[in-house]
Image (cartoon, grey):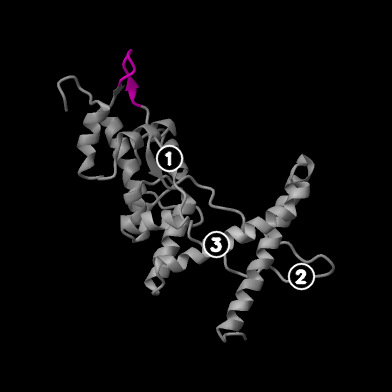
Amino acid sequence: MTARGHHSIGEVLSLLREEFPDITISKIRFLESQGLIHPERTPSGYRKFYPSDIERLRWILTQQRDHFLPLKVIKRRLESEGGAVPAAPPTPAEPSLFARRDADPAPASGGGGARPAAGDDPLAGPVSSVSLGRGELARAAGLDEASIVELERLGLLAPVDVDGEPRYDDECLLVARAAAELLGFGLGPRHLRMYKVAADREAGVLEQVAAPRSGRPDEAARVRRDLSRIVALGETIHRSLLRRALGEQR
């Protein structure tokens, strides 16, 4: 502790860097912007971090690193404790980000066929707010940073620039973990490119289908439902064709 009783943001960075190598000033500022930490400010705007602030920051970083918790879950946990750092690591009560969505859509019945349940919407992405640095994403996915860079180059990952540093969201985490498993089966990075090419081609066709109605606000929800159903049906056909091609048709 300094003689003045608090630390600057740079001093906090030095204190935490050995335990959290990916910590940066930009990340600390980002966590503040998301309302997870609330350092006091001097009249000139400099941040003042007291022991309680550093303890809170260390706890947040630990939840991200060890439990891969999204920021909104971390924030909710802190708020439930009245802002105090919880005594024990939380157990996520929300559905896993990595839950499989590979069941065929419900078979058609009657004239129009059953719509997929909201939870089976193939266009519904993760609803949390993971924000990881490149090293954090690599560790979470079981890859090295060079592989993350290669997945970016191939267009499979699309990080967001935050103060000059790439940050990776839930979708990036899902893709990176899936890519890691595929690489473990012997596929090379160049093979994974086929998924990006196929998705871009399909998206182009679906955009043409939706274009006539996409400019009408009253049609937005219906267009979204229709696109979701088209994607689900397309996934069914895709799986069937693969089963046939691989000789696994039942």
- Classified by dominant secondary structure, the portion drawn in magenta counts as loop
Q: Residue furthest top?
A: 43
Q: Observer-nearest residue: 139 or 156?
A: 156
Amino acid carrying mark 2 in the image: Ala
Q: Position of residue 34 (x, y in %)?
A: 44, 34
Quadrant, the N terminus: top left
Residue 212, horizontal then vertical, whole percent: 78, 49
Front label number (3 vs 1): 3
- Residue corresponding to mark 2: 108
At x 43% / y 64%, what residue is drawn? Answer: 179
Question: Which label sits in the foreground, 2 or 1?
Answer: 1
Q: CA–CA distance between discs 3 and 1?
A: 24 Å
Could you tell which of marks 2 and 1 lies nearer the N-terminus?
2
The residue at which mark 1 appears reads as: 161
Residue for point 47% across, 57% down: 156
Give amino acid for label 1.
Asp
Can you see residue 159? yes
Q: Position of residue 24 (x, y in %)?
A: 30, 38
Disc 2 element? loop
The residue sitting at 42% across, 47% down in the picture is 168
Q: Which residues are magenta?
A: 39-46
Q: Is residue 232 above or below residue 61?
A: below
Instruction: Check whether the beta carbons of the residues at disc 3 and disc 2 lie within 8 A of each other.
Output: no
Q: Which mark is residue 197?
A: 3
Disc 3 from disc 2: Cα separation: 30 Å
Say left or right for 144 vs 227: left
**Residue 25 x, y percent position in the rendering:** 31, 33
Amino acid on which disc 3 is placed:
Val
Horizontal side, residue 207 vs residue 96: left or right: right
Camera-near label (3 vs 2) is 3
Nearest to N terminus: mark 3 or mark 1: 1
